Amino acid sequence: MSQARYAPESFSVEHIVPRAKGGQTKLNNLALACQGCNNHKYIHTEAVDPVTGDVVSLFHPRQQRWGEHFAWTEDFAQVVGLTPTGRATVEILQLNRFGVVNLRRALHLIGEHPPQ
């Protein structure tokens, strides 16, 4: 959850359902992701919800709405999972990595975060 123009590495086109799990290279299965999130996702399509312990599907950006599964902390620096899917996605993608949180803080100070 960082903005491409401020990312230290180029964003990549990632397969929401990985090719290793039968995902196709078609628009409805592709998403733009920072390299860090893409690396953490790897071939996962599910993860453990840290609250319930249940295995749940990860957030699907083409089929689900961000605001239904996530929110920002009061300072807009960290992503909070609101649902089992949201919490599992925050965990597996490590959306609150140190560097990303620092970037969000700096961008917020100059009025460039959160994204619209």
Image (tube, grey):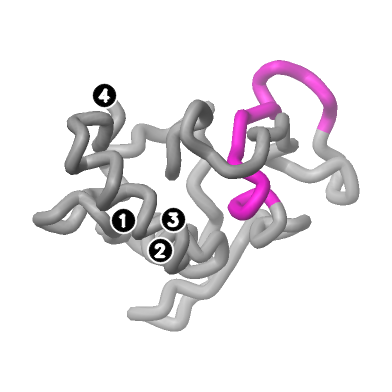
Q: How far apart, in angstroms, are the residues tagged by discs 2 and 1?
A: 7 Å
Residue linked to disc 3: 100
Residue linked to disc 4: 116
Q: Position of residue 66 (x, y in %)?
A: 34, 38
Residue linked to disc 2: 96
Q: Nearer the viewer, residue 37 or 81?
A: 37
Q: Earlier in the sequence, mark 1 or mark 4?
A: 1
Q: Earlier in the sequence, mark 3 or mark 1?
A: 1
Q: Nearer the viewer, residue 74 or 44?
A: 74
Write down the region rendered in magenta: 24-38
Compared to 49, does 102 lie above or below? Answer: above
Q: How far apart, in angstroms, are the residues tagged by discs 1 and 4?
A: 15 Å
Within 10 angstroms of label 2, few (less than 14), some, or many (20 or more) residues? some
Q: How far apart, in angstroms, are the residues tagged by discs 4 and 3?
A: 17 Å
Amino acid type of the residue tagged 2 in the rendering = Asn
Task: Look at 18% across and 42% down and name the residue there.
Answer: 109
Amino acid type of the residue tagged 4 in the rendering = Gln
